Image (cartoon, rainbow, N blue to C red):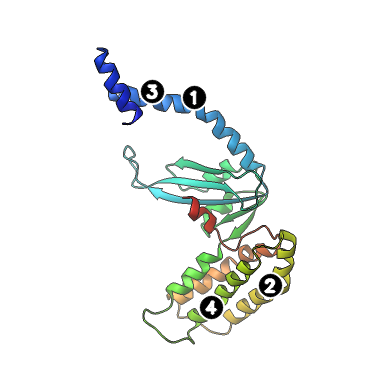
Amino acid sequence: MSAPCVFLFCHKHLGLEISRDNIVNWHIKVCHNALDVIAERLKSYLNQEEILHADETTYRGIQSDKAKTYYWLFSTGKHSLKPIVYYHHSESRSGDIPKAFLEDFSGYLHCDGYTGYNSVTNVKLVHCLAHARRYFFEAIPKNSKNETLPAVSAVKMIDLWFKLEKEWASLSPENRQKAREDYLKPLMTNFYEWLGTFTAVPKSKLDKAVQYALKHRAGFEQVLEDGRLELSNNLTLLRE
């Protein structure tokens, strides 16, 4: 039995006329008074980190006039000594939301290609390679067994990068950065040179994948700067 139901049950036996709405509102008020201070402290700690992850997802609020409202997720990186996962509610997906939340943050921000994150100042955006892989994967025709298709080749190239990352998982950040410089960087350079060797049909799924990869190249290559960074933003998916 939930706490409001227990309270409702007890007060009826005492002859007190208290509505369920009032009881629920009291619970909300208590949570605000007790937890808002903690939430602000956690937000402060997040802004002091050097590496963060961010993502947002939609849901429908019962008492909202909007078809979509949002939960924004902000979390520390994999190697943080103070792991924090913070869920921030908003009725907007505007870039003003992460800009305001991360107003004191200056570091690396893992995120997808959503343009709203461009509003965050004093950060280096680290874009998610899993998104780039997904676009190429979706460009592969269903039931196709043609291994020579550009989309198939692109997926295989990116899969190799993730395979190497798994092999380097036990390395120190310094050694991982060196391994990326020695092995991953040439592979990335080769990948982008290869993208220029064919022409995708305009507005096709393959064209969309190629344009996405080209547009966010700088964000993908940020992982070469610091061994603590991740190739994907999948850490947020595990926390949503």
Q: Earlier in the sequence, mark 3 or mark 1?
A: 3
Neighbours of disc 4 within 10 Å: few (<14), some (14-19), many (20+): some
Q: Nearer the viewer, residue 206 or 82?
A: 82
- Amino acid on which disc 3 is placed: Trp
Apparent side of residue 25 relative to residue 209 in the rendered image (left or right): left
- Amino acid on which disc 1 is placed: Asn
Q: Earlier in the sequence, mark 2 or mark 1?
A: 1
Neighbours of disc 1 within 10 Å: few (<14), some (14-19), many (20+): few
The residue to which callout 3 is attached is 26
Q: Secondary structure at mark 1?
A: helix
Label 2 to label 4, Cα distance in Å? 16 Å
> Is mark 2 in CB contact (under 8 Å) with mark 1?
no
Apparent side of residue 226 relative to residue 103 in the rendered image (left or right): right
Label 3 to label 1, Cα distance in Å? 11 Å
Label 4 to label 3, Cα distance in Å? 56 Å
At x 64%, y 63%, the residue is: 169
- Amino acid on which disc 4 is placed: Lys
At x 37%, y 79%, the residue is: 142
The residue to which callout 4 is attached is 156
The residue to which callout 1 is attached is 33
At x 62%, y 56%, the residue is: 125
The residue to which callout 2 is attached is 185
Residue 216's mark? none
